[in-house]
Amino acid sequence: MLTFIFKNRLLIGVLFGLPFFLFGLCTELAILHWDIAILSDNWIRIIAAIIISISLLPYVWMINDYFDAPYDRLDKVKGERNYFCSSNIQEKPYLAWILLLTPVLISLLFSIVIGVEAIVLVLTTLIIGHFYSAPPIRLKEKMFLDLISHGLYASGLFFLLGGIVLSPFSLVMHQPVFLVFLSISILDGIWIQFNSQLLDLEIDELGDQRTTSVLLGRQKSIVILRALIVSMLACTTFYLVANKSLRSYLTDSSYLFSVIFSFSLIILYLSQSYKLKGDFHAIRKHSAWMRRNFVYLFGILGVLLIK
């Protein structure tokens, strides 16, 4: 059981929850002029938030395993991968409750250290993540809601946690630059889920899964995929407008070039994408390449350029 938790589920928190939390933390710290004293004043809150970021997502993944166990038992490979299908769990059902409640209790306990806003954020993440898999709602089987809910519980809310560790919620939500990066985080969480669906599209179609990609079909899925990449790239333009401090150390020509370049990325992406015509897999790979090389690069440079 411990091997399952540490090897298969805590890793999810490290790979997803923690990076988005650090992204939000660095964004807010940059807005606060990289005042290191703020970090030392809030070190207990930051450590508590790091623990939450690592422990919260494993619950969402495990509750998904729990409700998918009856289906996974029908497939030998999936059944071996899902601990809730094991004979150990079936013989000792209380182990399932231990597995599920441990990350919940840890997250709620450490959210108390941060304050009311963190408690609300953790509860919101737990509720959305729970009903993503749990009947009767099962957001994972609702068109578009499967994508939106994933964008919130897997990325956006962790980014927001990084901001409220250093500043009140009311303050971060009035910072245009923070909202730009929050939007990128949510869109990226949506993209992660949608790209995963596209990778499994053929299998999901055979299994009659009601994911957004299956319900839309290949051609309409391509439209959504392009819209997600364009939206993330468009955030660079919003950033240039929102980050007014850029104008203080960029010449007018440099600023104009930056705006033109941000638009040219969108045009470049769309032109290359349409050249691939109806090649579904090629378009998905090209979109992934664009996200990896430009959206992430912009996120890093954008935070460093906040002044």
Image (cartoon, helix red, strand yellow):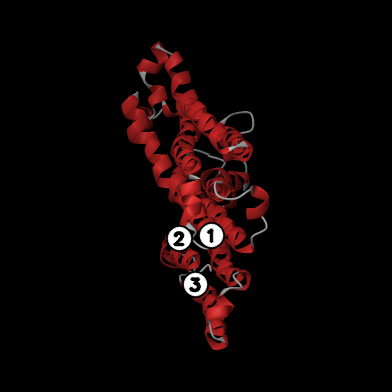
Q: Distance between the residues labelled 2 and 3?
A: 12 Å
Vertical relation: 124 (above or below) 148: above
Please name the residue that numbered disc 1 is placed on.
225
Q: Do the residues labelled 2 and 1 touch (CB within 8 Å)?
A: yes
In the rendered structure, which amino acid carries the disc numbered 2?
Arg
Q: Which residue lies furthest to the bottom in this view?
A: 253
User: For this view, does 202 lie left or right of residue 31?
Assistant: left
| Tag shown at residue 284 | 2
Count of marks, rendered view: 3
Residue 94 shows in the view = yes
Vertical relation: 192 (above or below) 253: above
Residue visible at 64% across and 33% down in the picture = 137
Residue visible at 46% across and 25% down in the picture = 102
Q: Position of residue 293 (x, y in %)?
A: 41, 66
Please name the residue that numbered disc 3 is placed on.
269
Disc 2 crowd rating (10 Å Cα; few below 14, some 14-19, many 20+) is some
**Disc 2 element:** helix
Residue visible at 44% across and 46% down in the picture = 18
**Disc 1 element:** helix
